[in-house]
Image (cartoon, helix red, strand yellow):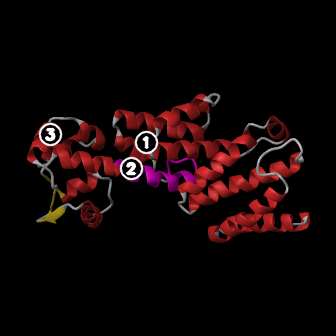
Amino acid sequence: MADSELKSLHAGLLSSVSKADYTAASRTLSVLKLALLERNALIPSSSTPVPTLLLAREILEIGALTSIHQTDDAAFSRYYSQLQPFYEDGRLTAKSPSPHRSKIIGLHLLLLLSKNDIADFHTTLENLEAPEEDPFIKHPIMLERWLMEGSYDKVWNATKGTQVPSEEFALFSQVLVGTIRNEIATCSEKAYASLPVSNAKNLLFLDSDGAVIQFAKEKGWEVRDGRVYFPVEESEKEALASGTIIENTIGYAHELETIV
């Protein structure tokens, strides 16, 4: 592929992203990665010109962010892995530091949280300098602390659009919220025989009674007479009813007093 064609494709990629046409961007990325492979630029090499490597880094970063808009966490993880040699190459950092590096690392940390991969989360942090000074890195750090405390209400508030450091974080946060919601659902099944639909809505951070009914259907719960009934053994409920998991989760003490 000629350099002129490569530049044209790159311009087309930028245009697609600016229009939020991520399907078109994904198609262009596939072609661009083949062109970079032909130029020995998918992995930094001393024989590859620095400008070509900088272009490759930018294309891979666009690919990582595009995969988030397509809710493809597997593709994001692949792009993240491909980018690491570029971030570790001193020639590229000296020539032109990446404006997207901390954002992509922060998104990787958020994805690790959603998968409950705490070991890899802390390993990634250990390799960063002053992580809490960067807003993209500080955000997942705070989320992880609240998760460890069981303060899921704080996590929920922090994942709302106005609280996240970028649009991509808001999109990826939905994966984390889904993980938390399923954990809360498991605790609820074991702690209670049933809950009013209105309380279940608050407990599970759902927006409406209809959303509770839909979620209950997916979990195999029964909903009747305005209550959600959990299909678990009575012995399991008694064993965990005295715990504080739910209280840490919801943070609404007054409402919890009226449950059951």
Within the magenta stretch, is there residue 71?
Answer: no
Q: Quadrant of the N terminus?
A: bottom right
Do labels 3 and 1 touch, CB within 8 Å?
Answer: no
The three-letter code of the residue at mark 1 reads Asn
Q: Dot 3 surroundings within 10 Å: few (below 14), some, or many (20 or more)?
A: some
Specify the label residue 179 is tagged with: 2
Res. 223 visible in picture = yes
Which is more toward the observer, 205 or 49? 49
Tell whether 104 sits left or right of 71: right
Highlighted range, magenta: 162-180
Where disc 2 sits, the SS reads helix
The three-letter code of the residue at mark 2 reads Thr
Res. 100 visible in picture = no
Q: Is residue 183 above or below residue 207?
A: above
Tell whether 200 sits left or right of 9: left
Image point 63% across, 55% down: which residue?
A: 65
